[in-house]
């Protein structure tokens, strides 16, 4: 279990989410701390992808859901903090792109 992000990290995430929400248009939602679940080869189970700080995805894939399931996000954002480790960031980026994320911002 990871410790809660520091207040400055939370503030940056909130500001980025608000900015992306304004730019995303009516068909998409920008959300923070949302889970992205990916189908596995065994279609009965789901893989829990790393949780990005912010993601932008089609509103129809998020509304009424507990997570983004299967649909790749248009944008994933990771806010760098002193506690981020370079290997973690590299690994997350690889997972995001291998499952169809459109853009990755750090």
Image (cartoon, rainbow, N blue to C red):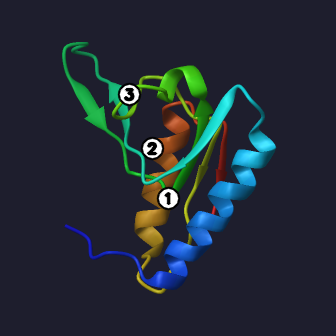
When the figure is inspected, residue 11 is found, relative to residue 35, above or below; the finding is below
Residue of label 1:
53
Q: Earlier in the sequence, mark 1 or mark 3?
A: 1
87 shown above or below 74 = below
**Picture residue at 57% right of the left edge, 75% below the top:** 11
Left of 15 or right of it: where is 67?
left
Viewer-side label of 2, 1: 1
Q: Which residue is mark 3?
A: 65
* Position of residue 68 measured from the top left corner of the image (x, y, whole percent): 43, 32
**Which residue bears the numbered disc 2?**
95
What residue is shown at x 25% (from left), y 27% (from top)?
Answer: 46
Given this view, does label 1 or label 3 mark the residue nearer the observer? 3
Determine whether the residue tagged by mark 2 lies in a helix, strand or loop: helix
Q: Nearer the viewer, mark 2 or mark 3?
A: 3
Check whether the beta carbons of the residues at disc 2 and disc 3 lie within 8 A of each other.
no
Task: Between residue 43 and residue 74, name the one nearer to us.
Answer: 74
Residues under labels 2 and 1: Cα distance? 15 Å
Q: Earlier in the sequence, mark 2 or mark 3?
A: 3
- Label 1 and label 3: CA atoms lie apart by 18 Å
Say which label, 2 or 1, has the lower sequence index.
1
Of residue 99 and residue 16, the one placed in the foreground of this image is 16
Residue 83 locus on image (x, y percent) = 41, 82
């Amino acid at each position: 279990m990871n410790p809660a992000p520091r207040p400055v990290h939370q503030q940056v995430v909130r500001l980025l989410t608000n900015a992306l929400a304004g730019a995303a248009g009516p068909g998409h939602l920008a959300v923070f701390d949302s889970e992205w679940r990916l189908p596995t080869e065994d279609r009965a189970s789901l893989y829990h992808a790393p949780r990005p700080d912010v993601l932008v995805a089609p509103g129809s894939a998020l509304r009424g859901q507990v997570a983004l399931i299967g649909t790749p996000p248009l944008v994933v954002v990771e806010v760098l903090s002193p506690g981020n480790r370079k290997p973690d960031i590299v690994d997350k980026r690889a997972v995001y792109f291998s499952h169809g994320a459109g853009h990755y911002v750090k």
